[in-house]
């Protein structure tokens, strides 16, 4: 392919890891096709800069500064940036000063058209990855992989020439998920609840994982069930969860820095998971899910998947204690409902989104 692609995305204890992880999925796939990829990331607490570098990509780190761009016209998530948009744009321009970029890919809720206009002279084309449809953009290509998202949601927010890729069929998943899809769907025909997967995102700053484990103690899980908890290496409650897992009534394993998430999901019978980027991975593999909303921007994802019959939703952490044991009891007592959730989830995402996005970048 021979493209030069730069990504501007951040991870932090506040932002989470999803933005960087989906950009890393795209970068890894592009490199396999001969592209050279670099990242510009701010050095927030909980960043993933070391992980990106371990994948072989160059990272330009930006220091955290005082955020001044917080006026009424700023993006709703402006405080997540760690600087003003103007300062961030100047630093990003400097990173690109001696590198001719074919595509600049921006995945950040705190950046909008003002930042993009300053960077456009430094790249041939600019792509935005978004989920919110809440601010203006100046880009050539925009991706929003939210279920139910339509192009009309962005028609007044982007230039007339901008190409829009909207909807869950464009969800960018690592190739392992498409590769395991048939196996995962076939084993769900008569699979009892023997393996429960808990995944609340890479950070889980408020310890939803711990609250889920507390609620499971009062649940009627099968005696032969075992539980796997997946957490990120920067999760602030990691050690507390590890101690909690040791006292569970069922064998409970806490895994960190998982490299085989596709296989783990495929071998799980039910997930309790956040309504973040991993939602699409679970759907591709037909993994029935009790979904927990942990942030305001997750409501649309959860609503769409609930309407599709793919998940049961806990609308806040406050519902975990009371509602989770009840949801589990209902699903355990009705295997047909669980199978139906699996089929509905698999219809949402088929794993081909990454290839479609790359096709548009290569034009």
Image: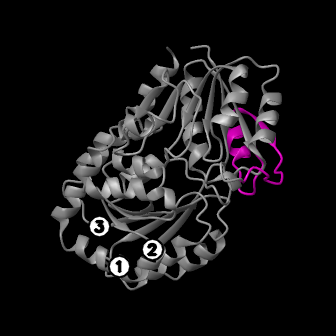
Which is nearer the eye, 245 or 171?
Answer: 171
* Magenta span: 42-70
Instruction: Give above or below for 240 relative to 126.
Output: below
Q: Residue at 37% across / 32% down in the picture?
A: 352
209 sits to left or right of 11:
left
Residue 258 is covered by the magenta coloring = no
Counting from the top left corner in percent of width and height, residue 264 is at 43, 53
Mark 3 / mark 2, whichever is N-terminal: 3
Counting from the top left corner in percent of width and height, residue 97 is at 82, 22
Counting from the top left corner in percent of width and height, residue 22 is at 54, 41
Q: Are marks 2 and 1 in contact (CB under 8 Å)?
A: no
| Circle 1 residues within 10 Å: few <14, some 14–19, many ≥20 | some
* Residue 26 appearing in the image: yes
Residue 186: numbered disc = none
Work out how far the residue at label 3 is from the one at label 1, CA to CA, in angstroms: 18 Å
Residue 323: numbered disc = 1
Front disc: 3 or 1: 1
Mark 2 / mark 1, whichever is N-terminal: 2
């Amino acid at each position: 392919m021979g493209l030069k692609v730069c990504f501007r995305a951040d991870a932090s204890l506040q932002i989470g890891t999803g933005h960087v992880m989906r950009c890393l999925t795209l970068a890894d796939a592009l490199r396999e096709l001969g592209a050279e990829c670099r990242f510009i990331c701010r050095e927030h607490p909980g960043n993933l800069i070391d992980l990106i570098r371990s994948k072989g990509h160059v990272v330009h780190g930006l220091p955290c500064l005082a955020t001044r761009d917080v006026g009424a016209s700023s993006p709703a998530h402006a405080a997540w940036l760690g600087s003003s948009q103007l300062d961030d744009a100047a630093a990003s321009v400097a990173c690109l000063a001696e590198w001719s970029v074919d595509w600049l890919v921006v995945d950040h809720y705190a950046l909008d058209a003002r930042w993009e206009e300053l960077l456009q002279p430094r790249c041939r084309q600019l792509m935005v990855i978004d989920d919110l449809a809440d601010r203006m953009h100046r880009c050539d290509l925009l991706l929003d992989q939210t279920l139910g998202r339509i192009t009309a949601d962005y028609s007044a927010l982007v230039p007339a020439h901008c190409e829009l890729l909207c909807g869950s069929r464009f969800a960018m998943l690592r190739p392992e998920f498409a590769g395991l899809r048939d196996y995962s769907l076939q084993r769900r025909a008569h699979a009892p609840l023997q393996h429960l997967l808990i995944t609340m995102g890479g950070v889980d700053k408020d310890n939803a994982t711990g609250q889920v484990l507390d609620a499971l103690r009062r649940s009627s899980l099968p005696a032969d069930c075992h539980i796997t908890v997946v957490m990120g290496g920067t999760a602030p409650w990691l050690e507390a969860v590890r101690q909690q897992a040791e006292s569970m009534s069922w064998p409970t394993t806490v895994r960190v820095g998982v490299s085989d998430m596709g296989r783990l999901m495929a071998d799980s019978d039910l997930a309790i998971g956040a309504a973040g980027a991993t939602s699409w991975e679970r759907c591709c593999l037909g993994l029935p899910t009790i979904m927990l909303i942990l942030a305001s921007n997750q409501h649309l994802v959860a609503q769409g998947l609930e309407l599709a019959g793919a998940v049961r939703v806990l609308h806040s952490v406050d519902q975990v204690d009371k509602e989770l044991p009840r949801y589990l009891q209902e699903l355990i007592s009705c295997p047909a409902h669980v199978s139906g959730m699996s089929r509905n989830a698999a219809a949402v995402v088929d794993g081909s989104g990454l290839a479609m996005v790359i096709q548009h970048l290569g034009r």
